[in-house]
Image (cartoon, rainbow, N blue to C red):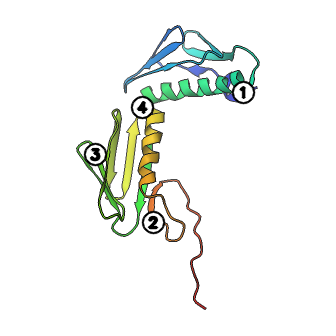
Amino acid sequence: MSRVGKNPVIIPAGVEFQANGRDISVKGKLGTLAWSIPSDVEFTKTENEVTFTPRNNTKVAQALWGTSRATLANMVQGVSAGFTKKLTVHGVGYRASVQGNLLDISAGFSHPVKMPIPEGLKVEVTDNTNIFITGFDKQALGQFAADVRAVRPPEPYKGKGIRYADERIRMKEGKKKK
């Protein structure tokens, strides 16, 4: 039994929910998101909440039940409040900056890495080392944050690289002289 799927998704006052068959769209002050609900899951909408139920008792339907509920909840939260991820750049000479629609990262390579910022996301850099990514689509935001981190993942000996702000790096002990 899904613990997540049992809970209804509350639609707040400023959010507009529309369903057309299996296709749903959520519109709020920050933007509009659309998604197609899997065929193994049913949904019912009352005046201000949406509940999900599995069509049958298969493993796939049970798995998609909670996933569908979580996806819709993320859509509603995204269009009403938005999401933010913070990354930090550690290392001597490592820095980041935003130039127009490009995120420019200097991370110890012989060249700067220029990454195009996806549509719907906003990137802000403070102190040349803190990268704030905000947007209303949680999946796109998480994917772009993962792509930025993949430019130079943190290494375990000195901790240099790009990491999430709340990420802890397990440091290894280096070589010792005898």
Disc with the residue nearer the chain's start (3 vs 1): 1
Q: Is residue 71 above or below residue 96?
A: above
**Residue 2, disc:** 1
Mark 4–mark 1 Cα distance, whole angstroms, equals 26 Å
Q: Residue at x 33, y 44 (%)?
A: 123
Q: How many C-alpha atoms fall within 10 Å of the one at disc 1: few (<14), some, or many (≥20)?
A: some
Q: Is residue 160 above or below residue 35?
A: below
Under tag 2, what secondary structure? loop
How far across and down, in percent of the image, does residue 61 sit?
69, 21
Mark 2–mark 3 Cα distance, whole angstroms, equals 23 Å
Q: Name the image quarter holding the C terminus.
A: bottom right
Mark 3–mark 1 Cα distance, whole angstroms, equals 41 Å
Under tag 4, what secondary structure? loop
Residue holding disc 2: 160
Disc with the residue nearer the chain's start (4 vs 3): 3
**Residue 102, disc:** 3
Q: How many marks?
A: 4
Question: Can residue 114 be seen?
Answer: yes
Judge by depth and name the residue closer to the eye, 144 or 128.
144
Mark 4–mark 3 Cα distance, whole angstroms, equals 19 Å
Residue holding disc 4: 136
**Residue 166, disc:** none
Q: Amino acid at mark 2?
A: Lys
Q: Is residue 128 left or right of residue 5?
A: left
Q: How many C-alpha atoms fall within 10 Å of the one at disc 4: few (<14), some, or many (≥20)?
A: many
Q: Nearer the viewer, mark 3 or mark 1?
A: 3
Q: Name the image quarter holding the N terminus.
A: top right
Disc with the residue nearer the chain's start (2 vs 1): 1
Q: Is residue 24 left or right of residue 108?
A: right
